Image (spheres, helix red, strand yellow):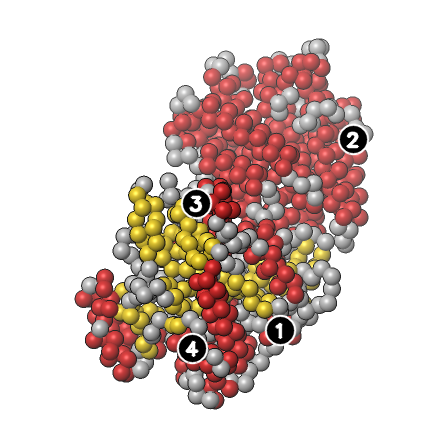
Amino acid sequence: MSQGITFTVYTDNEGIERIFPFDIIPRIITGVEWEHVEKGIKQRLTALNLFLKDVYNDQQIIKDNIVPAALVATCPHFTREVFGIQVPYDIYVHIAGIDLIRGDNGKFYILEDNLRTPSGVSYMLENREVTKRIFPDLLAQNKVRMINNYPLILHDNLIALAPRQIENPVVVLLTPGVFNSAYFEHTFLARQMGIQLVEGRDLLVDNQKVYMKTTAGLQQVDVIYRRVDDEFLDPLVFRSDSALGVPGLMSAYRKGNVAIVNALGNGVADDKAVYAYVPEMIRYYLNEEPILSNVPTYQMKNEEERQYTFENMTNMVIKETNQSGGYGMVMGNSSTKEQLEKAKTAILANPRNFIAQPIIHLSTVPCLLDGKLQPRHVDLRPYALCGPKGIEIVPGGLTRVALREGSLVVNSSQGGGSKDTWVVD
Amino acid sequence: MLSRIADSLYWLHRYMERADGMLRLLKTSYILSLDKVQTSGLTWEPSLKIFTSLSAEEIEVLKMNDSASLQYLVANTDNHNSLKVIITRARENARGVQDQITKEVWEQVNHIYHLVNDPFLTEKLAGPEAISVIDLLINSSDQFCGITDSTMPRGQGWNYMNLGKYTERCLLTVEFTHSFFKKVDFDFAKEQDILFWRSLLLALSGYELHLKNYSNQNHNYNVAQQVLFDRHFPRSLYYALGRAQKYLSEITASNPVEGTTALNRSFGRLHSYVHFSDLSIVEETGLEKFLLFIRKEMTEFNRIFAQIYFSYS
C-alpha cells in the first residue's frame, strides 16, 4: 500500500515520467530539534551568500588565504562570466536545499548544499496533502507545523526582486520543457504561484531587456525563476548548442534589467570540495562557530589525506566533486576490489575531482514495507527561501528513504522513496 | 497569453476534433463493411482518401481489405494522419500547456492516449471487438468535449481552443462532402438512394435530423442543403463558420495587433459568402468549385492567423 503511490499524478506512461514511491508513516522531528536545525541552516546560508558575493567581487576570502585560490579556480562551476554583476539585495541563493543526515549519535550533519536549482519541493508539498487524507485527525491533534505556504513565500520573494518599480511585475518560471524529469514540479509550482511557465523559445532579448512572445505582442519580463542549468541559459555566452536558453539573456542580467533566480555561478559554493571550507567561511564572515557541523571530508588533492583514504578505503565513500544525484559515488563497504582499484586510478588521474568521507551510519526510521514496520535509512532536505526580508525555512522538508534494506543511498534516481516530515511542537 | 500556449491550445483542439470526425467516419465505414451489399463500392475509400496520403492505386488495393484498412487508419504510425498519431500530437500539445488547461481536461486527453496505445489494440481491431473499441473511443472523445466545456475557464485560452475546433470542423465537413459528392459527379440531379447518403450523414451525426427534416426524394439536394446551410445542424458549414467567426472576433478584439483588421475582413468575407448563399448560388458556381474555394480560403486564413498570433519560433 505504501509503495507505488505516484506523484506524477497525471500518468502512468512508462519511461519519461517516473513514479516516486511514498511511505505513509511520517517522520517526526521535535520542535526543539528543529529550532537547532533552523538556526544552523540560516547561519550557513548567510555565510554562503556572503561567500558568493565575495568570490565574484573582491575575493577577500582568497586574499586572506582562508579558501585556496587554486580550489576556486579549478572548480568547474566557477563562472567568470558573472564576475562583478550586482544582484538585487546581494542575494545569490534564493532557494536552497540543504541535505542533512543524522549519525548514530543522534547529531545532525550537513551532507551537502544544493544552491543551484534544488528540486523535490513539490514532493514535500504533495506528501503532506496525501498524509492529510490518510491521518486527518492526527495532524491536528499533534500540532504539526504548516508547510503549504511555501509557494506564497517564494512568490513574494520573486516579486520583491523585480527591477522595475511597477505594481504587477512579470514573473516567469523558465523550464527546459516537457522532457525534463522535474517537469511535473515546474508545472506544479507555476500553478501554485499563478505565474507563467515559459520555455526558452518563448523569450527573447531586445535592447538588453527580456520579453516574452504573447498573442498581444511582446511583454517585458522582470523576474525569471529558472529551472535550467547555468550552462544552458545563454547560448551566446555558455554552450552555443543549447536550445533551452535565451540568446542575450546574460546581457540583460548584467545590465540589471531582469532578475534571475537562483543567481548564476552558484555552483562554486556547493562544490563538494569547497564544502569542506564552509565552517571556515562561517568563522570568517560571521565570527561565529558553526551550529551544524560538516561530515569530515578528505581532499584527494591533499597527499596526506589521500594516503589516509586509500588505507581506509572500505570505510569511506568516494564522491566526484561536481556530480549530484548519487551519480559518481563509490561506497567503500559495498564495492568489489576491482571497483576500489578503479576508483584509486581515477583519483590519481585527477585528484581535484574527488573527495572522500567516512561512511556515516545514517539514522533509521520506521517504514511500512510489505505490511510490516521495518527500519530504513533516511536523510532530510529542508528547503530555505532567502528574500529581502530574511531567510525562511519551511518546517520539515523532504525526507528521502533508502527503500532497499541496508542501503544508504536515498537519491530518487537510485531507487529512493520519500515520506512526509512532521515538525511537532 | 504566450504565443506558444495559444498555438498549443489551438492545435490540441484541432487534433481532437479531427480525431472525433475520423472516428465517426470509421464507425460508419466499419458497419457498412459488414453489410455485404456494398452500396456503390463505397466503404473505406473516403476514409483512406481523407486520412492517408496513399496513392490512388494503393487505395484501390487496400480498400477491399476491411481489417487492413482499419489497422492502417487507426494504429499505423507510418500514416501521418492515423488516429494514433493524431492523438499523440494532441497529447503533446496538451502536455506543453499543462498549467493552462484544467487537470480534468489533461486527464481525459491522457486517457484517450492510453486507449490508442493499448498493446492489444491491433489484435482487438482485427477481431469481433473492433466495434466496441471504436465506440469506446467515440465515447471518450465526447467526454473530452463535455469535460472541456464544463471545466475550462472562458478566457483567452477558450477562444483559441474553440477557433481550432471549428476551423477543423469546417475543413472536415468540406472534405467529407467533397469525397461523397464526387461519387455523383457533384450533380444534384443524378440518382442516388438514401442508403448511400446515410454513410455521410451518420459520419456527421446528422442522419436523424435529416429524417426529421426532409421527406421528399430529392436526396442529393437535401443532403447538400443540410451539410452546407442548415443553421441548426452543428456540423454544417454554416454553423461551424459562424462559431469560428465568433471566437475569432473575441480574439482580435482583445489582442488588436498589426494585421488583425485585415484578418477580420478576410474571414468576414468568407463567412458572409456562406451565410448569405443558398443552393441556387452553389448550383450556379458548381458544388466542387464552391467546396474547393472554401477550402482554399480556410487554408489561407489559417496561415495568416498563425503568422499573427503564433509566430514564436
CA separation, marks 1 and 3? 39 Å
Q: Chain letter of disc 4?
A: A
Residue B137: horizontal and vertical position, in percent? 51, 29
Earlier-in-chain disc, 1 versus 3? 3
Tell me where residue B285 sits by quadrant: top right
Please indicate, yes or no, whether residue B290 appears anywhere in the rendered image: yes
Earlier-in-chain disc, 3 versus 4? 3
Whether residue A342 sits left or right of residue B141 in the image: it is left
Classify mark 4: helix, strand or loop: helix
Please indicate, yes or no, whether residue B283 appears anywhere in the rendered image: no
Tell me where residue B151 sits by quadrant: top right
Q: Which residue is mark 4?
A: A279
Q: Name the one closer to the observer, A18 or B65.
A: A18
Is the C-beta separation of discs 3 and 4 under 8 Å?
no
Amino acid of disc 3: Thr
Tell me where residue A330 sits by quadrant: bottom left
Classify mark 2: helix, strand or loop: helix
Residue A222: horizontal and vertical position, in percent? 66, 64
Q: Name the one closer to the observer, A93 or B153.
A: A93
Quarter of the image containing the N terminus of chain A? top left
CA separation, marks 2 and 4? 78 Å
Please tell me how crowded label 4 is: few (under 14), some (14-19), or many (20+) other residues with Cα within 10 Å: some
Q: Which residue is mark 3?
A: A6
CA separation, marks 4 and 1? 24 Å
